[in-house]
Image (cartoon, rainbow, N blue to C red):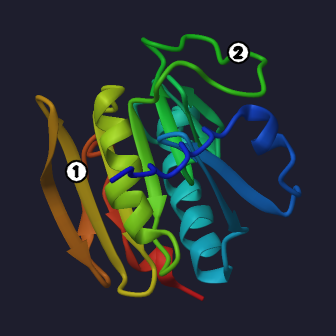
């Protein structure tokens, strides 16, 4: 009996990614082109408010230690994968000057993924192992629907939960534990 194998699936290319309309976010994860709509309002609010809380003390050094480059939705070229986290940061010891480039090949030290029903599984099962492979030290998952923050820290080859908080908690979450973060600000409409 002759068996016929399914044809090999074509790996996505950067040209495939560039063909995606600009009102969508495109990534290449494990060779597959993944396209999603722009984030909804609660997602945008949580990301914006997190940036407001972290940017002054860590990016600019106002009221905090400084020492970070923080960016919204940077395009990361990590091996054959192209990822667009909601927010990411590099310690200035690793990126003293931010390059003038459309994408970054240097993996960040920290990423934040704001979860939505359409992205949560992909963020946790497809993207998280790539972040681990690239030695991203901290990953935050923020869920504006359940009003939670989950902080993961790289521990060898895998991530461990470093903390989880919800609702109106005031937290010191690594790697930004030099300040107290008021979670209520991320959900306030």
Locate residue 37 relative to residue 144 in the image: left or right.
Answer: right
Question: Measuring 78% from the left and 62% from the top, which residue is drawn there?
Answer: 24
In the rendered view, would you say 111 is above or below 140?
above
Percent from the top left, x then y, of residue 69?
56, 29
Residue 13: which numbered mark, if any?
A: none
Tell which of 9 and 74 is nearer to you. Answer: 9
Judged from the image, the secondary structure of the residue bearing numbered disc 2 is loop
Question: Measuring 45% from the left and 51% from the top, which residue is drawn there?
Answer: 4
Number of dots carrying numbers: 2
Label 2: how many Cα within 10 Å (few below 14, some 14–19, many 20+): few
Judged from the image, the secondary structure of the residue bearing numbered disc 1 is strand
Percent from the top left, x then y, of residue 1?
33, 53
Percent from the top left, x then y, of residue 122?
43, 62
The residue under label 1 is: 152
Separation of residues labelled 1 and 2 (CA atoms): 27 Å
Locate residue 20 relative to residue 105 in the image: left or right.
Answer: right
Label 1: how many Cα within 10 Å (few below 14, some 14–19, many 20+): many
User: In the picture, which quadrant includes the C terminus?
Assistant: bottom right
Tell which of 115 and 118 is nearer to you. Answer: 118
Q: Are marks 1 and 2 in contact (CB under 8 Å)?
A: no
Locate residue 20 relative to residue 156 in the image: left or right.
Answer: right
Residue 87 seen by the camera:
yes
In the rendered image, which quarter is residue 159 located in? top left
Looking at the image, is mark 1 or mark 2 earlier in the sequence? 2
In the rendered view, would you say 83 is above or below 156?
below
Residue 172 seen by the camera:
no
The residue under label 2 is: 99
Question: Measuring 25% from the left and 55% from the top, which residue is drawn there?
Answer: 151
In the rendered view, would you say 148 is above or below 51?
below
């Amino acid at each position: 009996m002759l068996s016929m194998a399914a044809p090999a699936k074509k790996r996505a290319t950067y040209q495939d990614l560039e063909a995606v309309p600009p009102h969508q976010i495109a990534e290449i994860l494990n060779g597959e082109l993944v396209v999603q709509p722009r984030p909804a309002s609660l997602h945008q609010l949580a990301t914006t408010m997190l940036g407001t809380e972290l940017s002054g003390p860590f990016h600019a050094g106002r009221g905090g230690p400084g020492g970070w480059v923080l960016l919204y939705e940077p395009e990361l070229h990590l091996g054959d994968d192209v990822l667009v986290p909601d927010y990411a940061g590099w310690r200035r010891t690793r990126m003293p000057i931010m390059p003038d480039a459309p994408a970054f090949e240097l993996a960040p030290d920290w990423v934040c993924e704001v979860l939505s029903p359409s992205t949560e599984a992909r963020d946790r099962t497809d993207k998280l192992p790539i972040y681990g492979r690239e030695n991203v030290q901290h990953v935050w998952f923020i869920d504006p629907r359940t009003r939670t923050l989950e902080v993961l820290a790289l521990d060898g080859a895998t991530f461990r939960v470093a903390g989880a908080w919800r609702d109106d908690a005031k937290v010191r979450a690594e790697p930004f534990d030099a300040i107290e973060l008021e979670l209520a600000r991320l959900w306030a409409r």
